[in-house]
């Protein structure tokens, strides 16, 4: 996949309401040509949002952004309802006219918009709707032949940091000279890495097949360690099937448990969040019915806690599980990576273990 | 739903690989005009598959079947991945040309096939793609308010008889004056009952929502007991996510374990089939993380075993689990129904149990 050079569209929203843009800038490998936000035009990204550590200019329009030679336009926000704000249409059309690829994670499938499609065809560019999954085959078991260790992040709930943790670990691995191949399984991860499948959008029968294809692709890309972004949570009343699709489809060798320490109930449901030990038992027991995988560490999300409270939570997790635990955003990923890296190795499916 | 008179297409597969055809013949209300299978042409259905209890002729082609005045063509198999075998196209086109309605449960949506669609339009008939799901909302938890006990069949593999067992139990319940509402979750069940959702075809994020909507619909239909057809198997490497979608989405109060005693490996995979006790532990543990449900009985598929061997298997299941067990096809459903009926009662989600 060619590296992209993005103009990022986030009019009036870049500073405070553009998590997608921030994720791509902070963790992506693509170049950032410019950000389009008239409210911040004239500043650099660093001046507007210091922690993004990026000196790309912010400009007022796509036309101005063209000066910085982008080759793709990223829709940088995920507005409520997922529709493209009508005022943004002309900006998208300007980008298409300039032959920029359009990359979108909106619920609105831009590739099904007659005006955008016609324009893209005329200028000879394409629209990439990140949420739209490709056709994938059924799960075949080819994934069991992958030579690299596969680590899957699993969690105590959805939206606790399973993607961020894997990206941080990939960074730590790289600093140690190890190539960790991040495997994106949701729209934000896909935008960051430039490839992947939004597994929650795949037809149920094929969701494990999607997981398998993702790991096979990661193996081909040559990473020494495969780091799969998990989804949902195993006792999430709505999304657990997607979680399980990755547990079986990606055939992980090891699991990394990611927990937001502040959760007591699953998302909007009343379902109680499981304890560390219950989570470990449940994830390991289920993997163990197909291909054994053990939890090798715990990444805690202590966002919002004071330093001492965070330290207490990390200590508690270590004590209750006897596993390495840390908050990789608060404390950096090095400790956790160094603790789990020696544990990463291939395991065999149950069929081979039992003969 | 109007009653149909089916020609059933299952070339080379009717005897051994046509569970859709068998289900519709044995449990549906539609007439069977003829079965198309050149390998068995000249026999009756009864001669080829005695337990179907049906005297329709088996013929070599759709054109021959027309002699028996069908008004619809049923695609009688559910091949892996759900594609229409290419050699069957001309048979389907012959049926369309003769103005037969085409009823298909394949993943391949025949109504999106340009050639079939054009042909159907020309001859003035229609294509019913049973597997196409409606749009469903995300899982909400409304299912926890359903008043009727919900029994879900779960299995040691896919295609072991989870639908058949629930249809047989509904029959036994009816004989006792109890209205059991069969809930179809796959294409054959939908063809038999005339409603339902093919949950394996639903986008992963919405699969639990589909399970919930199905149980809400069954409750509205007024059954005293809700009997949900399960799917897949909890350690099926490809289909377990669909299994889990029903376990969480349908929020069963009790589970019925359905096991083909002859399976030692999951379908085409090498994954070992779990023992009765492992299955019970795995299903109950997982349900227990959201809404506790216990296994109340075991329905065994002893098809192909001699009488004594079947009796031994049933005895073994009873001994190993201390649960009522029987083969409801071989021995009728009355024993198993009478044994489990007193166990069926509402349970509460974990949130309420734990307060």
Image (spheres, coloured by chain):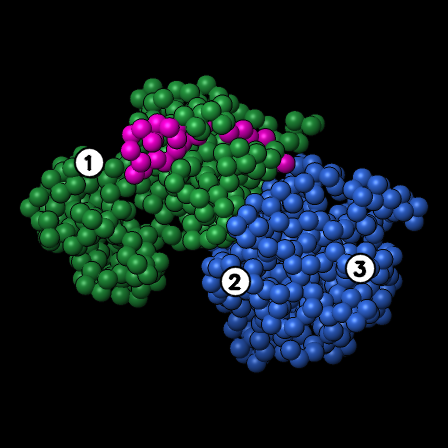
Chain colours: A green, B blue
Residue at 9% in and 49% down: A41
Q: What is the number of callouts on the image?
A: 3
Residue A35 painted magenta: no
Tell me the element at label 2: helix
Question: On the rendered structure, is A81 left or right of A276?
Answer: left
Q: Name the quarter where the N terminus of chain A is drawn.
A: top left
* Residue A139, image x, y percentages: 56, 43
Q: Which mark is residue A208?
A: none
Q: Nearer the viewer, residue A54 or B173?
A: B173
- Position above or below: B222 against A320: below
Question: On the rendered structure, is A187 left or right of B97?
Answer: left
For disc 2, the marked residue is B142
Q: Quadrant of residue A91?
A: bottom left
Residue at 11% in and 53% down: A38
Subunit of label 3: B
For disc 1, the marked residue is A51
Residue span colored magenta: A289-314
* Residue A322, image x, y percentages: 49, 23
| CB atoms of marks 3 and 1 within 8 Å | no
């Amino acid at each position: 996949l060619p590296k992209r050079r993005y103009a990022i569209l986030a009019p009036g929203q870049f500073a405070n309401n553009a998590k997608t843009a921030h994720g791509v800038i902070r963790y992506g490998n693509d170049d950032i040509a410019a950000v389009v936000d008239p409210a911040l035009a004239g500043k650099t990204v660093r001046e507007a949002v210091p922690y993004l550590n990026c000196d790309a200019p912010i400009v007022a329009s796509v036309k101005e952004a063209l000066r910085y030679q982008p080759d793709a336009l990223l829709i940088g926000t995920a507005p409520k309802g997922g529709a493209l704000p009508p005022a943004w249409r002309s900006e998208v059309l300007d980008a298409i006219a300039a032959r920029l690829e359009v990359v979108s994670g909106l619920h609105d499938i831009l590739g099904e918009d007659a005006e955008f499609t016609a324009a893209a065809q005329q200028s000879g560019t394409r629209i990439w709707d990140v949420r739209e999954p490709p056709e994938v085959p059924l799960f075949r078991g080819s994934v069991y032949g992958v030579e690299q260790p596969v680590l899957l992040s699993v969690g105590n709930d959805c939206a606790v940091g399973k993607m961020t943790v894997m990206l941080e670990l990939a960074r730590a691995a790289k600093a140690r000279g190890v190539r960790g191949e991040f495997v994106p399984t949701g729209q934000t991860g896909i935008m960051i890495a430039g490839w992947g499948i939004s597994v929650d959008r795949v037809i149920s029968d094929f969701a494990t097949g999607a997981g398998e294809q993702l790991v096979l692709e990661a193996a081909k890309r040559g990473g020494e360690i495969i780091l799969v972004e998990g989804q949902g949570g195993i006792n999430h009343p709505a999304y657990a099937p997607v979680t399980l699709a990755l547990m079986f489809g990606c055939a992980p060798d090891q699991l990394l448990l990611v927990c937001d320490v502040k959760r007591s109930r699953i998302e909007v449901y009343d379902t109680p969040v499981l304890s560390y030990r219950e989570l470990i038992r449940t994830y390991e027991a289920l993997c163990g019915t197909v291909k054994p995988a053990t939890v090798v560490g715990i990444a805690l999300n202590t966002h919002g806690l004071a330093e001492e409270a965070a330290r207490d939570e990390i200590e508690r997790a270590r004590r209750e599980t006897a596993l390495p635990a840390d908050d990789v955003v608060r404390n950096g990923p090095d400790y956790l990576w160094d603790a789990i890296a020696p544990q990463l190795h291939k395991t065999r499916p149950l069929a081979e273990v039992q003969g």
